[in-house]
Amino acid sequence: MILVTGGCGYIGSHTCVELLSAGYEVTIMDNLCNSKAEVVGNIARITGKTPTFVEGDIRDAQLLDQLFARNTFRAVMHFAGLKSPGESMSQPARYYENNVQGSLALFQAMERHSVLQLVFSSTAAVYGNASALPIREDSPPQPPNPYGRSKHMVEQMLGDMVSANLAWHVSILRYFNPVGAHKSGLIGERPAGVPNNLMPYIAQVAAGERECLAIFGNDYPTPDGTGVRDYIHVVDLAAGHIKALEHLLKNAGVHIYNLGTGRGYSVMEMLRAFEQASGRNIPFSIQPRRAGDVAASYADPQKAERALGWKAIHGINEMCIDTWRWQQNIAATSV
């Protein structure tokens, strides 16, 4: 059985689908601060298998001890945490408490119960404004905000714990820009309030929920002047977790991998592709650059391909089509 913290969230839920489809039993632990319990039922509808669900917080050491005592977990996939870079600038203490303190409580419980196999959900935000592209795993970390710094702190924590106890088996996965949704239309990204990420914002404009997409800067040194990012389909990302899990069960130590496509798309490319996928016109306005934004960021994913046998297979059209299907399903179910 695999324990998945934050398993009702966007990436966690898609990974639960992949785990169940691969024959693993799954227990989800989620405090539902950024997700909904109905996701568990939708995971079951997709896979025909119902994961066990425990509502709770990873900062609750007593609950963690009870959970580990009642179950025999083969490994933990740790997604639980806060993830808005902008919000982290105004609420840094909240991010350090949830992401760092929460992770420490989880890792301590794992050590107490001798469950030392872990896949950790990190982020390409640890790289900040990388000096060279594509970004490799040995690029010096320089996270630009408390969100990125909290993830990097957890990475450092894990490195120290592995050095102190060589029985640990750890995979750290640095995501680039997850987009898309499951092809069933039953699970996807559903941000509370104003979306922080490009794709759900574009989808809401296409659906008429928002008036206009703000594009921050069109004077970057990129082909069309708008920022370039490495967008990866969430199903590809979830599949990477299964490959990482299979690898770490056989290999001790700490292993860091980029999960991206190795290809960057500009904001305008994403907008035009979404217009084609949705058949809708998407109004936009050009706004000044935002402080801290970089011109381009995309991964070198070769290490994951060599070590894990993993490679992203979904392209920009599938990313947009699947997002639009999910957005339409949200609209249909909220009427």
Image (spheres, grey):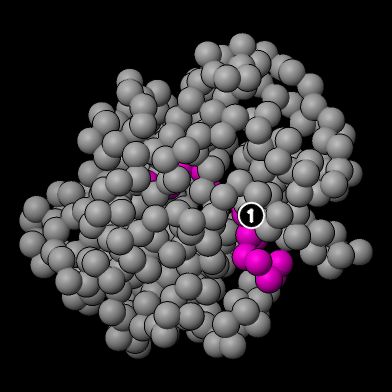
Per the image, label 1 sits on a secondary structure element best described as helix
- The reply to whether residue 80 is in sight is no
| Residue occupying the point 25% across, 29% down | 140
The residue lying toward the viewer, choosing from 310 and 111, is 310
| Residue occupying the point 69% across, 46% down | 200
In the image, residue 96 above or below residue 143: below
Q: Position of residue 192 (x, y in %)?
A: 70, 50
| Residue occupying the point 24% across, 67% down | 247
Which amino acid type corresponds to the residue marked 1 in the rendered image?
Glu
- The reply to whether residue 174 is in sight is yes
Q: Is residue 313 left or right of residue 243?
A: right
What is the quadrant of the N terminus in the image? bottom left
Q: Position of residue 32 (x, y in %)?
A: 59, 64
Q: Position of residue 81 (x, y in %)?
A: 47, 53
Q: Is residue 129 left or right of residue 256?
A: right
The residue lying toward the viewer, choosing from 36 and 286, is 286
In the image, residue 142 above or below residue 253: above
Q: Is residue 31 magenta?
A: no
Tell me the residue that label 1 is attached to.
318
Q: Is residue 281 left or right of residue 38?
A: right
Q: Which residues are magenta?
A: 174-188
What is the quadrant of the C terminus in the image? bottom right
User: Callout 1: few (<14), some (14-19), or many (20+) C-alpha neighbours within 10 Å?
Assistant: some
Q: Position of residue 256 (x, y in %)?
A: 26, 49
The extreme right residue here reads 335
Q: Is residue 175 magenta?
A: yes
